[in-house]
Amino acid sequence: MSIIVCWHVLWICSQTLTIEVQLIMTDPIKKTANKSVGKSIRILRHQHGWSQEDIASRLGISIPAFSKIETGVTDVNLSRLEQIANIYEVSVVQLLTVDNEQAEPVPSHLNVIQKKLTDRETEIASLQRKVIELYEELRNKSSIAV
């Protein structure tokens, strides 16, 4: 009987503690913390030159799910923070304390040009595929007409 009473008291205490923690972590504080952690993660990703797709695949999650972490939309549990810290080869504490002011990379002129070049190359490849498709279609129509 005393074991059951003790367990019940512990359960009530744990519920009270949970409620107190929830009261301390109000919504605005939680949102601010999530955004701060997300910004630190994004800064580290930029410093390494990795895409969201790179990190998402390493974490085994979708790109939109990782984007939600970086933007602070979703809560990040300790397990996920440890995974992310391991990818960047930093401790969780370091991950949480990235100096946002100094670490935010300023895109250089070269990076902007490189991005534009990559976009153009993708566009050219797409147009080349369309030209080939149209040529094949025209060739097929001319062979049917003959």
Image (tube, rainbow, N blue to C red):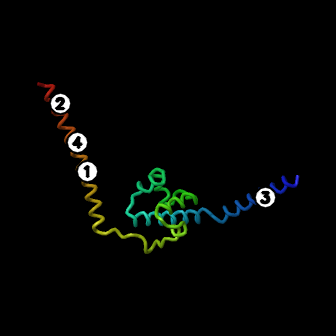
Separation of disc 4 and disc 1 at Cα?
11 Å
Q: Which mark is residue 10?
A: 3
Rendered image quadrant of residue 18: bottom right
Please name the amino acid that badge 4 sits on: Lys
What residue did someone put label 4 on?
130
Residue pushed farthest left?
A: 146
Separation of disc 1 and disc 2 at Cα?
26 Å
Q: Is residue 81 above or below residue 127?
A: below
Residue at the image position 24 percent from the left and 48 percent from the top: 125
Q: Nearer the viewer, residue 126 or 23?
A: 126
**First reached walking from the N terminus: tag 3 or tag 4:** 3
Badge 1 vs badge 2, beta-carbon distance below 8 Å: no
Q: Where does the image place residue 107, in percent across and percent down from the top left?
A: 34, 68
Residue at the image position 59 percent from the left and 66 percent from the top: 29
Q: Where does the image place residue 17, in percent across and percent down from the top left?
A: 72, 62
**First reached walking from the N terminus: tag 2 or tag 4:** 4
Determine crowd level at label 2: few under 14, some 14-19, many 20+ residues with C-alpha closer than 10 A.
few
Determine crowd level at label 4: few under 14, some 14-19, many 20+ residues with C-alpha closer than 10 A.
few
Q: Where does the image place residue 7, in percent across and percent down from the top left?
A: 80, 55
Q: Is residue 3 above or below residue 96?
A: above
Please name the amino acid that badge 3 sits on: Leu
